Image: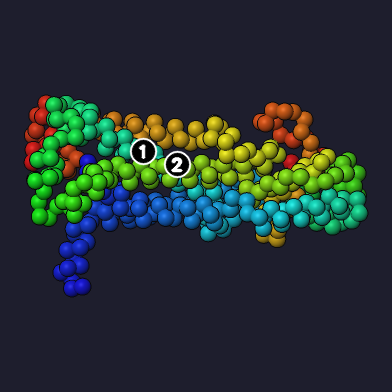
Amino acid sequence: MSAPAQRGFFRDNSLSLVFGGLLGAALVGQAWWGVVGYNEAARTEGLQEVSWLRYVTSSDFAVDVAENWQSEFLQFVLYIGLTVWLVQRGSSESKEPGDEGRESDEQQMLGKFVRPDSPSWARAGGWRTRIYSHSLVVVMLLVFLGSWSAQAIAGRVAHNEQRMRDLLDPIGLGSYLVSPDFWGRTLQNWQSEMLAIGTMVVFAIYLRERGSPESKEVGAPHVVTQSSD
Amino acid sequence: MWRRERTWSSAASVLAVGLPVALVLGGCGGAIERQDAAATADVFVADVTADPAAACALLAPRTRESVEQDGTPCVQALPEADIPAPGARGTVSVAGHSAQVRYARETVFLSLFDDGWRVTAAGCTRGSSDQAVPYDCTVEGD
């Protein structure tokens, strides 16, 4: 690949690359502080400390990661799905009031309105276009369900590890799914995600960030719902 | 909003692979771990009276300190600790670095150290049906 092409790739994908880097850095930091905390607790109880590698492959680390992942993807599933049918007047995160629903083929560039460069499954019609029409929510939903399941499985192991340290019986998966530990981890993340997305919807009516596609233009009136194209 | 969704989607599809791997490696209490924990507990409960020195060597450091807290050496204190005869072994549970081995008349708790499983509490019986109340143990760490 030539040098100009490389510059073009990084420039064209800078948002994804930066978020990928930030995600990696945050995971490393979480693992670092996590093993420090785990080993502090182990010393307090006179138990074996663990290596960084052992910690990042432990259920303690897995449940802490999964409980945040599931809530993020639930947030997007709800937001993508609900914004089809619900609106917020004046918010750049919303469609115009009156545009609720799946929209016409013309608006969605489907059927006779497809373009030559439309995705192949959008041009295909039939079941492939129906699936592709919901692929974003479906994938987000699958990642949410996978992450939530991972939280349940890893959370039970981590919870039982601590229970046996405390001279208590371990509990089965069914009991764990109705335990305060599982729902405490779940709901503390859900409430923060709902707060964040709800705040974004409302703040975007009145506040601006010049140049950001997440914001209306600085001079756009508060009553204007979508950014101008 | 769509740009952010696409960013997260691509990142997650890559990293979603890592979580199941971590779960598998994280140790959900594999058969080998259960066998090792049970073997240590079996040796311990058999050696409490037959070979106290060997049983003491299987105690976790904090538990051994507790046994010797009044100045009596472990080899003398452990056989006098009123640990009941265990009876037949029952359920073995392992989660992470913790294990529980149930016998007919007592329960043993263990923790994983660099040199293997070590007993953190023994002679344990349930004093309450409340699952939030710990076992009563004749030998345990402070």
**Residue drawn at (20%, 28%) of the image:** A87
Which chain letter goes with mark 1?
A
Q: Counting other residues with Cα less than 10 Å from the Cα at mark 1, is it few (<14), some (14-19), or many (20 or more)?
A: many
Q: Are marks 1 and 2 on the same chain?
A: yes
Q: Nearer the viewer, residue B116 or B62?
A: B116
Q: Which residue is mark 2?
A: A148
Residue at screen point 45% across, 46% down: A65
Q: Is residue B114 above or below residue A155?
A: below
Q: Amino acid at mark 2?
A: Trp
The secondary element bearing badge 2 is classed as: helix
User: Which coloring applies here?
Assistant: rainbow
What's the residue type where badge 1 is placed?
A: Leu
Q: Is residue B115 left or right of residue A226?
A: right
| A100 and B9: which is toward the camera | A100
Return the residue at label 1: A74
Q: Secondary structure at mark 1?
A: helix
